[in-house]
Amino acid sequence: MKLRQNVRHFASKKALELPVVGDLVSDKLVDLHTGIFLDKADPAHAEERREHLDAFFDATMDTYLAALQEGAPEAEAREITHIQANFDFFNHGWTEMMEFPSDELDQHYDRYEQFFERHGIAIEDPLGEFAPEEMPEAPSTPEKLENPEHPYAEGGFADDVYVEGDDGEIYVGGQEEPAEVDVADAPGVSDDDVEA
């Protein structure tokens, strides 16, 4: 799959592992992801998906941290969470929100099969052990699975994680983490938060 990667992603990674600041960053990242994907959703169904997406993306923050703790580089840990989201979108028939075509689901699963199996994650169970006790439901659009349209999907990136840097270059496997990362560069964090 192809993702973007810049200093904000590395700052977010560092911030999420900190007390207090981690909660601020997590909340901001959930809001950002919900907003991004609601913008891709069928406008007739967008608002009814908000609560579900908020809870889903909140759970993927735990997945992200678990992947990092198990040694995954930042890009791979983040890609795992995006794959989980695409599993969920597919299961609901929200194909217009998918980031890769539905015929690549198995390839993406296979790349992280060991991690997914360790945590009970499957295409039909995208959150596995990271699922909250109560997940808000949202209506499905299964009819879209018959002839899926993926206006935002980029196919052909299922064999590895590809990241596009701020310089426009594509890096297979992700970029090297900068030596100096300022937590204040993470979304939702100010210098005051860091000092506190």
Image (spheres, helix red, strand yellow):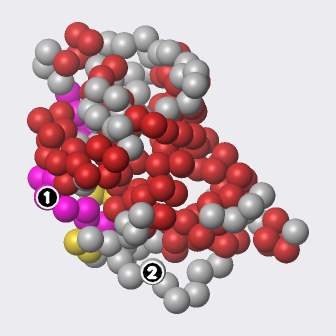
Say what amino acid the circle numbered 2 marks: Glu
From the image, tell me which residue sits under label 2: 177
For the residue pair 176 and 116, the one nearer the viewer reads as 116
Q: Main secondary structure of the magenta part?
A: loop
Quick check: 106 left or right of 138?
left
Instruction: First in sequence, mark 2 or 1: give its number.
Output: 1
Say what amino acid the circle numbered 1 marks: Asp
Tag 1 secondary structure: loop
Which residue lies at the image location 66% right of the left edge and 46% below the top edge? 27
Give the x, y percent position of residue 71. Answer: 40, 69
Of the 4 image quadrants, the one containing the C terminus is: bottom right
Which residue lies at the image location 40% right of the left edge and 48% below the top edge? 81
Question: Is residue 153 highlighted in magenta?
Answer: yes
For the residue pair 11 and 149, the one nearer the viewer reads as 11
Give the x, y percent position of residue 52. Answer: 52, 24
What range is drawn magenta here?
149-164
From the image, tell me which residue sits under label 1: 159
Which residue lies at the image location 12% right of the left edge and 35% below the top edge? 103
Q: Residue furthest front?
A: 118
Query: For the residue carrying disc 1, how many other residues have a C-alpha within 10 Å: few (<14), some (14-19), or many (20+)?
Result: few
Which residue lies at the image location 72% right of the left edge and 53% below the top edge? 24
Of the 4 image quadrants, the one containing the N terminus is: bottom left
Measured along the vertical axis of the image, is residue 138 above or below residue 70?
A: above
Q: Residue furthest bottom?
A: 179
Give the x, y percent position of residue 187. Answer: 64, 59
